[in-house]
Amino acid sequence: MGKATDDELSAKTDVRLNTARKILYNLYNYSLVTVERIRDEKTGWFIFYWRLQPDQIEGFIQNQKRKILEKLESRLKYEQNHVFYHCGTPTCNRVIFEDAVELVFRCPTCGKPIQHVNNEKIIETLTDKIEAIKRELSE
């Protein structure tokens, strides 16, 4: 794989130069690209040549999946260990039982009465996502 300047990459991808540079520096921070800095003899400015590090990509993806798995497992545990109440207004948040008792079963946002919410669908979805990521990580 060759190297390219940020200008070349910006032109090829139709991404604004500043945006392309931000992306490249983020990729650099994750060691997914390397950069070679060369001073232009005529202008005295530095030219940055970027090169993809394809051998780092798989490890990066695996690491990101492990982080996501950890967050999903934490959320699953939270959902399984709490009972939730909600007023039915889409913009209002669910309330856990302990808070609902303190609020006398009234929504803290809109004041409507709150009812028990079945979170089995959320638990099922989280469980499915966790299992899918675990399968991907074991392959």
Image (spheres, grey):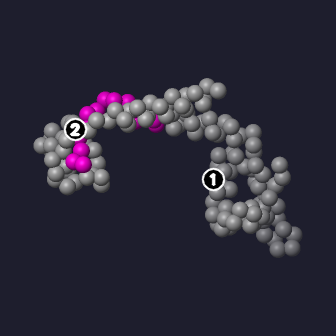
Where, by quadrant of the figure, is residue 126 drawn? Answer: top left
Q: Are marks 2 and 1 in contact (CB under 8 Å)?
A: no
Query: Can residue 99 be seen from the camera position used here?
Result: no
Determine crowd level at label 2: few under 14, some 14-19, many 20+ residues with C-alpha closer than 10 A.
Answer: some
Give coordinates of residue 120: x percent, y percent.
34, 32
Where are the magenta residues, as a range?
71-88
In this picture, is 74 found above or below 40?
Answer: above
Q: Residue furthest bottom?
A: 43
In this picture, is 32 found above or below 6?
Answer: above
Position of the C terminus by quadrant:
top right
Compare marks 2 and 1 and give the one earlier in the sequence. Answer: 1
The circle on residue 26 is 1
The circle on residue 89 is none
Residue labelled with disc 2: 116
Q: Which residue is rendered at x = 37% and y = 35% of the image?
A: 121
Using the numbered discs, state the Cα–Cα distance from disc 2 to disc 1 in whole angstroms: 44 Å
Q: Which residue is rendered at x = 28% and y = 35% of the image?
A: 118
Give coordinates of residue 51: x percent, y percent.
78, 51
The amino acid on which the numbered mark 1 sits, given as a three-letter code, is Asn
